[in-house]
Image (cartoon, rainbow, N blue to C red):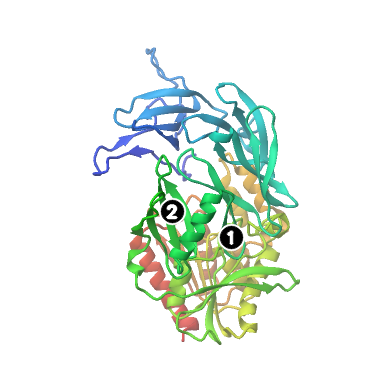
């Protein structure tokens, strides 16, 4: 792994006063047999008055220690209960090097074990095996499997103690449907919900270990459906009490469910958290998500659909600058990352920034996006890049056809896969856009596969990206000669998702061809570029670039 960037994290506890910083993970040793990237994760919080947590804890054995009988032997992921005051730990599940995760029931009991299967050389196969423990038992029994390559099998979402069951999603008619599986040894499975257009993607529960009250999906907007009558009624009441905040979520609760944490927001309101007394229905605001934007006029977002060149219906979101007529305007196409992800209706800080500068923004959920079923995912946006990139270009043509955008004042901006889509679009349709911004972009599919070498997911990445002529023709770096317009590249030099070499090579290729290109390189930042100064700088540069090339 010499010279290779790897991510790592450390789990800590700290007092409410910011003092008493303590590590929850295993202590590092000079004799550690391997790199410990991650300490683990919190599975459960104590349900009584004790300040303790149930932690999935990563153990690394020692090797090479001589003259000592205290060499550490425990290896793999186990579960401990940890007292946060004293850091005293009590073993709950013994460490196992094959195990990659656990699920608890919210009441302090581990019920499901996760094992990402690997070949004999340690390379992941894409198959995940799940096992469960019956109530009161320590024995693990097979529950099912999931294959990340095609989405087949079951994918557990939440264990419900009160019904001794687990909620899972699995395929039904090419889309994810929600089922309840009994954990009593019968394997009984009951269909809870399905949607003819989109995937069911989550469940909603209140409090730690309390009942699951509903499920979620996203069509034009994110939807929550409550099969609990009490919360269905409460949701309607909140909708009336907060008429300008149509996105309302039950985000958390006290241990007994008597106090609820509510999030409410919209496309033009980033959101506020409220504290609700379940019994008295008294509600008070706790915190605004983005206080500096309070009182600011933001731009409304509209869900639309447009036809691709081959006749497919493509969902998208259009943001029209506040106060504008939305006719014959300069516009920006903003494809999302992933590619197996999707945009949703609501507040988006990057889209709102661009709209605030006076530009229409369209965010296409091109084929390759997730949430719309297997057929729409179309393998993925790398293997079937021609379809995904065509859909992105058709978003620009839709704006022109509708009279919203001026065809001579179009730009494209994207992050991660969106940055890839921006560069590839400009290369294969060189007359469509006047400028390109690519933030942390993939630029070469062969390089993307090489980046994964030495990691356990190398085979999965190779399969996901594809190979041969399709991968070569689908790489913006190989198509740099086709780009005619100014390009702004933005990248952090500690990006472990997409290495900065992608942007460095792209800058070099464009510069060698005499193309106008700028690379903003941020030292010490990763894929998300989570730094206020960096974001202020590159947003300012984006604004200037747009103004110069498609400005008013």
Relative to residue 323, is residue 153 depicted above or below? above
Estimate the x, y position of residue 311 in percent, counting from the top left.
Answer: 75, 72
With 180 as the anchor, is 110 left or right in this view?
left
Towards the viewer: 77 or 515: 77
Q: Quadrant of residue 533?
A: bottom left
Asked if residue 153 is positioned above or below residue 419 in the image, the reply reads above
Viewer can see residue 415 = yes
Image coordinates for residue 46, horizontal then vertical, percent: 40, 33
Q: Is residue 320 above or below residue 239?
A: below
Q: Nearer the viewer, residue 98 or 315?
A: 315
Specify which label sits upstream in the sequence, 2 or 1: 1
Image quadrant of residue 85? top left
| Residue placed under numbered mark 1 in the picture | 342
Quadrant in which residue 420 is drawn? bottom right
Q: Which residue is mark 2?
A: 526
Mark 1, secondary structure of its residue: loop
Residue 279 is situated, as x and y percent measured from the top left of the image, at 40, 49
């Amino acid at each position: 792994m010499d010279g290779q960037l790897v991510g790592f994290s450390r789990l800590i506890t700290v007092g409410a006063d910011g003092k008493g910083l303590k590590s929850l993970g295993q202590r590092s040793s000079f004799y550690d047999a391997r790199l410990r990237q991650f300490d683990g994760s919190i599975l459960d919080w104590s349900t009584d008055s004790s300040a303790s947590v149930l932690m999935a804890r990563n153990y690394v054995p020692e090797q090479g220690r001589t003259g000592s009988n205290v060499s550490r032997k425990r290896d793999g992921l186990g579960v401990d209960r940890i007292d946060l005051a004293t850091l005293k730990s009590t073993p709950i599940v013994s460490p196992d090097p094959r195990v990659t995760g656990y699920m608890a029931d919210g009441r302090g009991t581990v019920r499901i074990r996760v094992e990402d299967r690997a070949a004999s050389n340690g390379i992941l196969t894409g198959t995940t095996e799940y096992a469960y423990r019956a109530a009161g038992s320590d024995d693990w029994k097979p529950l099912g499997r999931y294959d990340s390559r095609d989405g087949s099998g079951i994918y557990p979402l939440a264990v419900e103690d009160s019904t001794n069951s687990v909620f899972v999603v699995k395929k039904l008619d090419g889309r994810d449907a929600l089922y309840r599986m009994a954990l009593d040894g019968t394997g009984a499975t009951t269909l809870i919900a399905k949607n003819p257009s989109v995937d069911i993607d989550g469940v909603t529960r209140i409090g730690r270990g309390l009942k699951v009250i509903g499920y979620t999906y996203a069509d034009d907007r994110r939807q929550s459906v409550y099969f609990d009558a009490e919360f269905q009624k409460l949701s309607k009441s909140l909708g009336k009490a907060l008429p300008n905040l149509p996105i309302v979520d039950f985000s958390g609760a006290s241990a007994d469910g008597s106090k609820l944490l509510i999030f409410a927001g919209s496309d033009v309101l980033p959101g506020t958290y409220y504290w609700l007394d379940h019994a008295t229905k008294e509600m008070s605001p706790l915190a605004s998500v983005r206080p500096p934007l309070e009182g600011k006029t933001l731009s409304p977002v509209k869900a639309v659909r447009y036809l691709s060149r081959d006749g497919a219906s493509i969902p998208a979101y259009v943001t029209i600058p506040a106060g504008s007529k939305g006719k014959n305007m300069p516009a920006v196409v903003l494809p999302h990352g992933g590619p197996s992800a999707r945009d949703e209706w609501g507040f988006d800080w990057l889209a709102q920034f661009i709209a605030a500068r006076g530009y229409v923004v369209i965010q296409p959920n091109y084929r390759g996006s997730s949430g719309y079923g297997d057929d729409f995912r179309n393998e993925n946006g790398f293997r079937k890049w021609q379809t995904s990139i065509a859909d992105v270009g058709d978003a620009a043509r839709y704006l022109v056809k509708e009279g919203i955008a001026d065809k001579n004042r179009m730009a494209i901006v994207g992050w991660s896969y969106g940055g890839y889509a921006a560069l590839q679009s400009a290369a294969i349709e060189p007359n469509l856009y006047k400028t390109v911004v690519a933030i942390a972009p993939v630029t070469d599919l062969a390089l993307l596969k090489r980046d994964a070498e030495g990691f356990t997911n190398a085979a999965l990445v190779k399969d996901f990206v594809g190979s041969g002529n399709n991968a070569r023709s689908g790489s913006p770096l190989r198509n740099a000669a086709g780009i005619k317009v100014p390009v702004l590249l933005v990248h952090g030099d500690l990006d472990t998702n997409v290495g900065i070499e992608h942007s460095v090579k792209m800058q070099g290729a464009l510069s060698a061809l005499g193309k106008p290109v700028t690379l903003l390189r941020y030292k010490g930042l990763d894929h998300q570029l989570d730094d206020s100064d960096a974001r202020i700088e590159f947003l300012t540069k984006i604004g200037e670039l747009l103004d110069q090339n498609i400005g008013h």
